[in-house]
Each structure stands twice: as structure tokens, then as C-alpha cells.
Image (cartoon, grey):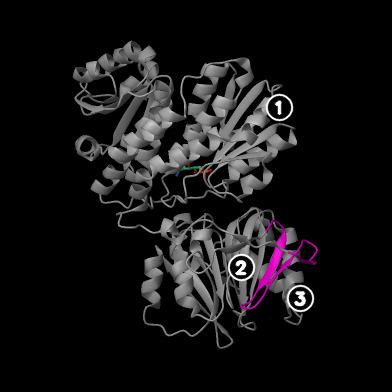
Amino acid sequence: MCGIVGYTGFRLAVPVLLDALANLEYRGYDSAGIAVVECGKLKIFKKTGKINNLKELLKNKILSSSCGIGHTRWATHGVPEERNAHPHINDDCSFAIVHNGIIENYDLLKKKLNNQFFRSQTDTEVVAHLLNKQLLNKALTETNILKSLKLVCDDLKGSFAFAIVFNKFKDKIFVAKRSSPLIIGVGKNENFIASDIPAILKWTNKVIDLKDNEFGIISAQKVEIFDCNLKIKKFKIREENIKAEQIILNGFDCFMHKEIEQGAEAIQETANKVFNNTLLEQLVNKKQNINKIHICACGTALHAGLIAKFLIEKYCRKDVIIDFASEFRYKNPIINSNSLCLFISQSGETADTIAGLELAKSKGAFCIAITNVLGSRITQIADFVIPTFAGPEIAVASTKAYVAQISALLGFTKFLFKKEDIEIDYNLQDIYNICDWWKNTNFDEVILKVVKMIKDLDSVFFIGRSVDYYVAQEAALKLKEITYIHCEAFAGGELKHGSLALINDKSVVIVILTQSEILEKTLNAIHEIKSRGAKIVMFSQFLQLKDFADLFVRLPNKNQNLMPLVCAKPLQTLAYLTSKTKGFDPDKPRNLAKSVTVE
Ligand code: M6R
């Protein structure tokens, strides 16, 4: 949430900062701003809304600066207005600061700043004034700035990645970090800072990962990193594998569309790696004492976890306890050294998931992270990492990462309790078959008919039983997230216990039916719905059920365990096409951001 960038080098800073920010826009798009050091003065520009508005503002400005910082905001403290946009400044505008994270004790700190005048409602401005206070009556040297910054950071509770520029230093950016991501991009006679790789990939793929409680001074020629005691540190430069073309639209109308199409590759690449992961096999063999499995995640990642719960309980006959990370971290979960905890996160940054992981570790559980971002915070804490290979996911709505997570979990389940001679009746070839089908199938025609039925409704309901209920939950989340239609998923058997009261002759109920064992039971629910005059859209491979539906979306007849993967393509397409038809931008839904790094 929120993206920060910085540039120092030989290029004009403004276009670099704007370009870099545009590639971080998925982290927040309530407002954006930059600060550049121009002839010994700081120039600050801010605009509400998307980066394009800021670009427009700067269109005719001539700025020769080659050093600056930028920010794209997802509002936490303070409404999305210009005064709350970053960068924030101290009283005499001698420095400007951008921040990604959240200062939990900002209110208390603000009160301590007695008569201070505040221009904004943000937690970040408090940090600017605290730093100003520390610097008062001190010579503005690099050492004094670092010392003062450290003292400020010591008083902060919460998460932060800061980048600061001073009018006195024409090519230096000061940085500090705790719990929010910050990378330094290393170039030739130029250096960058950013919250995430896509921001800087156009110029360099050489990256330093700043660690928690580290500080840095970045200039065009030099990068210096300091530990928590401000001792200079050696650092590693790694090469990032993501290619610049992976983060451009390449002819697609939006990233969500592109990423749905990339689902097949994400599933295949991930399955390939996980099913052949000998380290995972050895690990699972060593962990035969495990008596309890917990899964903890948020949003779509949690829905992938639900599918794993279904598979593990079905085949391994072990209880799987699944929790929203935001609940897990506060419920005092019953875990110990015989517990295996799985944490699933596309970004590897989600604050609640990370907090859950830290908690499970402190209780001695063995913790596995499933993530799409190697090097992310989750990978630094977990005992074992199962990477997914979806490639960078830019759209806020998770699509290819979700199917990659399911693919990884299918592999994980295969290894799990292998010793107990349990026959699991799906294999790598079954998954490859689904990938081929995915690449060669287009649902647009039939899905547009569904779109027509639902686009003007206030509510859309989904039902399913068993694993289909989990698929329905994900479908409802995806649709509501980018169309702003109220969507809810019900377990088929639960309708008559209350929710049926919502159904009338205007309602459309989307039924997911892919499991033969619950076919007849789901039909009962369909009858109940139809008797109230509602319309049924059915997603199923059971052609014999066609006549029960007002609209039937035919699925291929694949291995039943893999049907959640199959369902993902038409259901993601439904969300995408409904969003487009309603005139929204599927990539940037209102009020949301891609990485939820705050609680
Ligand atoms: O990065 P994570 O997988 O931890 O993110 C978890 C959720 O915030 C995320 O899946 C969210 O629900 C998606 N926007 C849904 O499409």
C-alpha cells in the first residue's frame, strides 16, 4: 500500500520519477506527488487521483533536477486530498519525506509536538516534524541526519519505508526501513530506490534489498548502507529475473485480462517446479510428527487455501484449520512444535499474514510460505518457501497468482503424508491437460450473456457445496471487487436457514456444480431458488443438468480435484467482462490497493 520511489543520477529526475510511479500505481492511486532538488531548493508537486493527473500538472514545467523522490498513495490517515498527498515537508521546506507504511503511535507523538502547525492529517507529517526537531541546532551533515533519523525511528511504532531529500544535498536520498519493503536499484552513475521492482526495471535489474532497521544514503555514485547502530555495512547486489516486458500490457486492454490469459503458464510453471521439488519431498518426509495443519492468508490467497483444505482433508484425513490472517493473529491459536502452518501470500508483504507467521514461529510451529515474490518479507521469516511462478501480477484483482497458488498446493498435498500410502488420483499430466485447455478456450461469448443478466443488479448470489462453495467464495470476491456489485457466496445447503429470504424474481443465482457426490443435493437448492422466481446460471461439466439452468456455462470434464482450476478461467472472465461493460477500470478498483501492508 503506497509506493515510494527515488532517483539520483544524470537523467532529468521528473520523467524518471513519474515513470517509476506509474509502475507502482497498483499499490495505491488516491493521490501522487514528487519532490525534486532544484538549484538548492525543494520543489514539491502533488495531485489527487492517478499518476496521469500529476503528469498533466508537470507537463509544461521545466525542471532540471536530477535527484528526487515520489509517492503514490493509498489513503490510511486523512482523506485523499492534495494536502494529505506526499511528500511532506518540515516548516522551512528544507527537507521532504515520502513514506510507505503506517505509524501506529502517531497520535501520541503528535500530541508531544505541542504547538506544531500541521498542514495535513497524515501520520507521515508527524515524522517530518520529529526529524526537524532532532535536527534543530545541528549542522546539516550526513552523520547528523542519520543520527537524528535513527532517533526518530526508535520512537516509532508500526511500519515504514522512508525516503528523504534535503535542499542542501543536490544528489542524496536518505532512507530508513522497518517492515515495509524498500529496494535500491543500482545503475551506472545513477541509483534508484523503490517499494518494488517494477518501478525501476526499465533502468536496472541490479537490486539491493534493504533490511529492517537499516538506513542508507544513496547518491549517483555511491550506495551506503548502515545497520541499526549506524555502522556501515556490506551489502549484496542481486540480479532480478523479471523482464521489463513482463510488466507492460503488450497489446492487452488491461493487466487483469493479460493475467487471466497467463493463467495456464502460471499453473504449468508452478506445478512443474513444485511436483519436482525434491527439497519439499525431503522436508515432508522429515515432518511425519505433524498432527495439525493450519492455513492462514487473506482474500484470494485464503480461497486458494480453502481448496488445499479440501484436498488435504480428503486425501490425508488430517484436520486443516483455516483462518483469515487478521483473525489468526488475535485468536491465540492452539499451535505448537507439532503444528505445520502454511502462509499463502502473492505479494509476501501482507501485514496480517506476516504477523500470523511471526506468531506461529514464536509458538514453535514449522512455517511454510507460499508466495509469488522471492525475497519478500514472508520469505525472510518462513522456515521453508514454496514459490509460485506466476510472474509479476499487476492488476489488483488476483487471477494468475490464485491459480498458481492452487497449483502449488496440489503439489504440496501430493507430497504430504506420502508415507501413509494414500492414493492421490491426480498427476502432473492432468494439470498439463488443463493448461492446454486453458490456452485454447475462450469463454467470452457465453460469459457476455451472463454479464447481460447481472450487470444492472444490486446483488449477485453464488452457491456451491463442498469445494464448489470455496470456488463460489472466490468468484464472489472477484466480481464484487471490480464491479462494485454486492456479491455473496452461500453454501448450497444453508440457503433455507436464512439467506433464501433475499431471493426474489429479480435475483440471479450463479451455481457452481463440479463434484458428482453433491450433484443431487445442489439440485435441491436450485429447485428452492427457482420456486422463488430467480434465474439460475450454472457453471458445470454435467450436461444432463443443462435444463435446470436459465443459462448453462459448459465446463470440460476434467479430473474432479482439478475443477477449481478449470472454474477459475470463466469466473475470472466474468468479473473482468462485467467490470469492462460497466465502464470501470478492472486493474484499479476503487478504495483498494494490491499489497496490503497495513493492518
Ligand atoms: O498478496 P496477498 O496474496 O497476501 O494478498 C491477499 C489479498 O489482499 C488479495 O488476495 C486480495 O484479496 C485480492 N485483491 C483479491 O483479488
In the image, is residue 272 above or below residue 39? Answer: above
Which segment is the magenta one?
211-234
| Separation of marks 2 and 3 at Cα, in angstroms | 16 Å
Which residue in the protein does label 3 denote?
Answer: 144
Query: Percent from the top left, x then y, of residue 216?
Result: 69, 68
Secondary-structure class at tag 3: helix
Q: Confirm or reject: label 2 Cβ below 8 Å from ligand 1.
A: no
The kind of residue on which mark 2 rests is Ala
Position of 409 compared to 261: left or right?
A: right
| Residue 22 visible, this orientation | yes
Query: Percent from the top left, x then y, of residue 560?
Result: 39, 21
The kind of residue on which mark 1 rests is Lys
| Separation of marks 3 and 1 at Cα, in angstroms | 51 Å
Mark identifier at residue 163: 2
The front one of 54 and 388 is 388
| Separation of marks 2 and 1 at Cα, in angstroms | 44 Å
Of the residues under marks 2 and 1, which one precedes in the sequence?
2
Query: Percent from the top left, x then y, of residue 238?
Result: 62, 60
Mark identifier at residue 286: 1
Secondary-structure class at tag 1: helix
Residue at horizontal 75%, vertical 82%?
139
